[in-house]
Image (tube, helix red, strand yellow):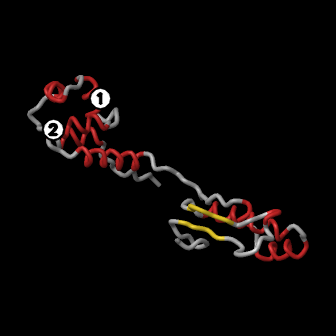
């Protein structure tokens, strides 16, 4: 069975056929946009890619949007060389993999659990919210102080930290 190849229009030939007037020679266009004729010829024949500088020169000379040209260049490159991305998994800090039953077991069998739980909470909050402005979860020898177990102020909410 034969392979079917999608016909892909290169950006250089597109500009040659759709942007540059047919009555202008490559030499005349090169002079008009301030570029060497061999470099422009290579581009128009699909041998080099469109640069931002060239797109801006074409916009100034022929009134075509440089953004449109750069978008067409991007589309061409994506069609030519699609990025093969395998499965990607998000990084999960080791302590986010701890289950509720592991925490219960840890608290039941570890005398230091009460002093370290707040340290765990601080790490959890910092790892899941980049917009924490203030946080106070006392740990270690300071874990037995009176009052709140801890508090956090954050500009952005997450599933674990409310805004405010």
Image: 78 above or below 43? below
Is 118 left, or right, of 126 in this rendering? right
Residue drawn at point x = 18 percent, y = 30 percent: 33
Residue drawn at point x = 28 percent, y = 26 percent: 39
Q: Residues within 10 Å of mark 2 (few under 14, many from 20)?
A: some
Q: Residue furthest left?
A: 23
Residue drawn at point x = 29 percent, y = 32 percent: 43
Image: 28 above or below 152? above
- Numbered label attached to residue 136: none
- Residue 78 in picture, x, y percent from top left: 40, 49
Residue 61 vs residue 17, the one in the foreground? 61
Is 12 left, or right, of 59 in this rendering? right
Which label's residue is closer to the chain start, 2 or 1?
2
Is 9 left, or right, of 1 in this rendering? left
Q: Secondary structure at mark 1?
A: helix
Q: Residues within 10 Å of mark 1 (few under 14, many from 20)?
A: few
- Tags 2 and 1 in contact by the CB under 8 Å rule? no
- Residue 111 in picture, x, y percent from top left: 90, 70
Q: Quadrant of residue 148?
A: bottom right
Residue 147 vs residue 40, the one in the foreground? 147
- Numbered label attached to residue 20: 2
Q: Which residue is mark 1?
A: 42
Q: Secondary structure at mark 2?
A: loop
């Amino acid at each position: 069975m034969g392979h079917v190849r999608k016909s892909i229009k290169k950006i250089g030939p597109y500009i040659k056929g759709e942007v540059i007037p047919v009555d202008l020679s490559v030499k005349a266009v090169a002079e008009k946009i301030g570029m060497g004729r061999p470099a422009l010829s290579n581009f128009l024949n699909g041998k080099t890619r469109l640069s931002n500088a060239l797109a801006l020169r074409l916009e100034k000379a022929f009134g075509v949007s440089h953004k449109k040209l750069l978008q067409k260049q991007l589309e061409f490159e994506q069609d030519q060389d699609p990025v093969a991305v395998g499965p990607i998994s998000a990084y999960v800090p080791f302590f986010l993999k701890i289950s509720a039953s592991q925490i219960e077991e840890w608290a039941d069998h570890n005398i230091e659990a009460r002093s370290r739980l707040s340290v765990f909470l601080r790490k959890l909050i910092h790892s899941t919210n980049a917009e924490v402005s203030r946080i106070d979860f006392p740990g270690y020898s300071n874990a037995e102080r009176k009052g709140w177990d801890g508090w956090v102020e954050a500009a952005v909410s997450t599933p674990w930290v409310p805004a405010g």
